[in-house]
Image (cartoon, rainbow, N blue to C red):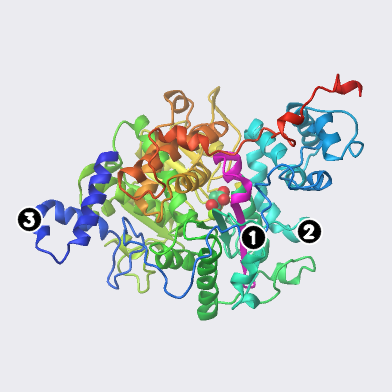
Amino acid sequence: MLKKIIKIYKSTVYVLQNLNSKKVNDKVNRLSFEKILSISMLGKVKNNMSPSGLLSQTPRKSLPDFETEGTSLLGCACMGDKTPGAVSGFDRLNNPALNKSLAFSINERQLLGIHGLLPPVVKTQNEQIKHCKLRLDRLNDPLDKYIYLMDLLDFNEKLLYAFVKNHIQETMPLLYTPTVGSACQKWGFIYRRPRGVYITMYDKGHVYEVLKNWPECDVRVIVVTDGERILGLGDQGACGMGIPVGKLALYTAIAGIKPHFCLPITIDVGTNNECHIKDPLYPGIKEKRRTGKEYDELIDEFMKGVVQRWGSHCLVQFEDFGNKNAFRFLEKYRNYFCMFNDDIQGTASVVLAGLIAAMRITKNKLIDHVILFQGAGEANIGIANLCVLAMMTDENITEEKAREKIWMVDSKGLIVKSRNELEIQKRPFAKDHEALKDLLDVVKKVKPTILVGAAAVPGSFTPEILQEMARNNERPIVFALSNPTCKAECTPQQAYEETKGKVIYASGSPFPPVTYNNQTFITGQGNNAYIFPAIGLATMCAGIPNLSDDYFFIAAEALANQVKESYLEEGCIYPPIDMLPECSIKVASTVVEYAYKRGSATVLPEPSDKEKFVRAQLYRTEYEPAIPSFYEVPLGDQKNI
Ligand SMILES: O=C([O-])CC(=O)C(=O)O
Ligand SMILES: [Mg+2]
C-alpha cells in the first residue's frame, strides 16, 4: 500500500512537472496518466478550487514580502531549554519547566541556595505521582480536577506529564473532551495564569510584535482557534483558548513533543455568543464577531508572522474554526505553509482508521459499503474525501465511482443535485435523487452500512434509525462523533441495545464500557487525538514542509495496524486510550518513513531506523539533575540531615 501511494504521488509530481512537455506521453502511459490526474483533481469543481486538496502538491511558494527570523537565538529569552546554572535556585522553584518541588535532592538544594525553602523531606517522582493521585481523587467535579491539573502544569510541568502518562485513561477526559468543553464555557471564571497568546482585531498591523512577546524562540507547533465552533458547543470566542491549550497538552503527553515547542493561540475577533458578551467575567473582546476582509487580513498577517518569528517549518494546526472559514483557510494556506486542519484532516484520518479496522470484522472492503453522513461540516466532508482517496487507491476506481458510495444529509436533508444553493465542498457529494428531509427516511431508502454523525445534534440516531440499521446489516457500523459527550448522536449503550448487540460503534468522546447480554464491550473513541499528535511529531522529525491528504491516509493505515484482534473481539476498533502514546510513536514513525520515501522530508541526513530516531526526540518526564553531576558528592543519609 505504502509503495502504491508513493508511486501515485511520484507520478503525479512528475506529470505536473512535465505537463507541457512531450516527455509525459513517452514516459507515462495514457491509463496511468488519467488515473493520476483524476486522483490529483479529486474534489475539483468548476472554479478550480479543490475542497479536499487531495494530493495537492504544488511546491510551497515563498511569500515575497517578508523575511524569516527563523529560530535564531539572538535577541530573545528562552524559557524551555535552560542550561543548568543559567537560572537561580529560587527561580527554579517558580519555573514550571525546571521545578522539581520536593524532588530536589539535599545536594541540589544546598548548591542552588534553596535549602530551607522547601520542607526537609525529599521525594521521588513516583511518590509525587501518588500524592497527585490522592489530591485528584479528593475532588468530585471534573472541572475542579481540570483546574487541579492545570495548576500542576503551571507549577511542575514534568510532574504533570509524568502523572498523565501514568493515568492516561483517567486524565484524558479531563484535559480533553468532555471536560475541556466545560473549561472553555467557563474560561473567564477559571482563568488563573496566562498560557499562550491572544491576538485581537486591534492588533492588526502589529501581529508580529505580539508574537515576539512570546518568550520561546524555538516554537515548532502552534494550535490556533478563533473560537467560532468549539467542539459541538458553538461560538465561545476568546474562551475557546481551552482547546489549543488542551490539544497541545496532548501533543506533549501523547506524542512526547517538548512543552516549550508548543504554543496555543487564540485569535479574538469578537463573539456572537450573547451569554459571553453579557458575562462580566468574559475575558475576550465584547463585540460582535468581525468577518470579511479585515478578518482575512488578520489571519494572513498571523500566518506570515508565524513564519517570520519561528520559521517556515513551524506547524500550524487550525482547530475549531467555523465551517466556512475552516475550508477556506485550508485551501488558501495548505500549499504555502506547514499547516493542517485537525477537524477536517485529523478527524478524517482517525475515522478512516476505524473503518479499516472494522472491515476486519465485516470481512469486506470499503468499496462494498454504503456510507451515510449525518452533517456535512468539517469532519464529515473531510472523512468523505479521505474515504474517496482510500477507495481510489485501493480499488483502482474512478473518483465518481468512489463518490457513488457516499451519501450526505445536512440540516436541510439529503444533499441532492436539485438544491438551489450548495456550498462548494458539498457539491461533489450531491445525488440525483428526490429530496428527503428526515434522516430515518434516508436510512430506509439509502440503506447505509455505515452511519457517521458529526452534526452536534444529540440523540439524532434515534432507536428507529438504529433498529433500521440492524435490520439492513449483519454488522452495522455507527460512528457518533459529536463532542463533547452530551452532543453524541447516541450512546454506545443505546447502539448496542437497539441493534441487539450487532453494532460496531465508535464515539468522539469517551464512554464507559457497555454491558449487553451479560457481555462487556469497550467501545472505541474515534477522536483525532489518535492522529494529530502523531502527525505533529512526524512533521517535526522529518521536516515535512506541506501536509497533503496522503499523509493522513498513511497515518490512518498505520493506526489501523495497531488494532489487535483482541480489541476487535471486545467490540473496539481503536487501540485502548492508554496505548495512545505508543500508537502515536508507531504512526509517526510510519509517516516519517513515508515522507522520506516520497522525497518530501527535509531533515538530513535521513535516519536509517526511523522509529529509533523518532523515539530519540521525545520529551522525558523524568527529572534532570539540577546541578552538574560532579557536584553530587555523598552527603550521608539525606533523610537524616
Ligand atoms: O477536540 C475533540 O475532541 C475533537 C475535535 O477536534 C472536535 O470535536 O472539534
Ligand atoms: Mg476540533
The type of residue carrying mark 1 is Gly
Taking depth in this image into account, of 78 and 202 the one nearest to the observer is 78
Q: Residues within 10 Å of mark 2 (few under 14, many from 20)?
A: some
Nearer to us of marks 3 and 1 is: 3
Taking depth in this image into account, of 619 and 190 the one nearest to the observer is 619
Stretch of the chain drawn in magenta: 250-270
In the picture, measured across the screen, residue 182 lies left or right of residue 134, that is left
Residue with the mark numbered 3? 26
x 23%, y 49%: residue:
8
Mark 2 vs mark 1: which is more N-terminal?
2
The type of residue carrying mark 3 is Asp
C-alpha span from label 3 to label 1: 54 Å
Which x, y percent locates residue 228? 58, 65
Whether residue 400 appears in this view of the structure is no
x 46%, y 54%: residue:
379
Residue with the mark numbered 2? 189
**Contact between labelled residues 1 and 3, with CB atoms less than 8 Å apart:** no
Most distant residue in the left direction:
26
Residue with the mark numbered 1? 240
C-alpha span from label 2 to label 3: 67 Å
